[in-house]
Image: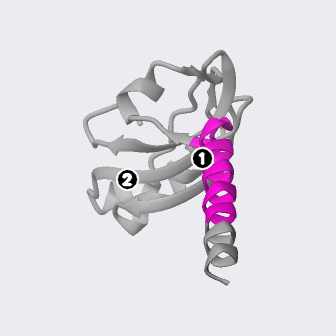
Amino acid sequence: MTRRLVVSLLLLSLSTFTCLAASQGASPQSVTVGQSVMAGQIVAKVAPIYPPLARQARVQGAVVLEATISENGEIVDLHVVSGHPMLVTAAVEAVKQWRYRPYLLNGQPVSVQTQIQVNFRLDSAN
């Protein structure tokens, strides 16, 4: 009985180790990459249109977005982290149109999680 229990535990440990090793060897589905690194990967950037009501109300500031960028460089998911509500829609609409150079990990394109900051200033051209 004890021998059977030991063999069972050994087999269970071995199968757990094998599954763990296999999962670590697989390429990740998505990686987190810093904002400054991804800024260098942009190939097409659409500037946001400053909302007229925000301009009239003299609202300015940054909108921070959490983005998922696909293996081919398209924005596939976008969530607002922070920003003035009057500026958020313009930032999201602009960033949805951005395109990136595919991010490579071990020579293979991977999906990326990153933050994007869109700045709105009244003295600038947006």
Q: Is residue 17 magenta?
A: yes
- Considering only order in the chain, which callout, 2 or 1, is on the residue closer to the N terminus? 2
Q: Is residue 59 left or right of residue 111?
A: left
Where is 79 relative to 64, above or below?
Answer: below
Quadrant hosting residue 78: bottom right
Q: Is residue 63 magenta?
A: no
- Which type of secondary structure does the marked residue at label 2 adopt? strand
Residue that appears at 68% across and 52% down: 19
> Around disc 1, counting alpha carbons within 10 Å, would you say few (fewer than 14), some (14 to 19), or many (20 or more)?
many
- Does any portion of residue 37 appear in the rendered image? yes
Residue 42: give x, y in percent of width and height: 55, 23
Q: Residue beneath label 2, please?
A: 63
Q: Which residues are magenta?
A: 10-30
Where is 49 relative to 34, above or below?
Answer: below
Q: Residue beneath label 1, please?
A: 68
Extreme residue in the right direction: 72
Residue that appears at 60% across and 61% down: 13
The amino acid beneath tag 1 is: Thr
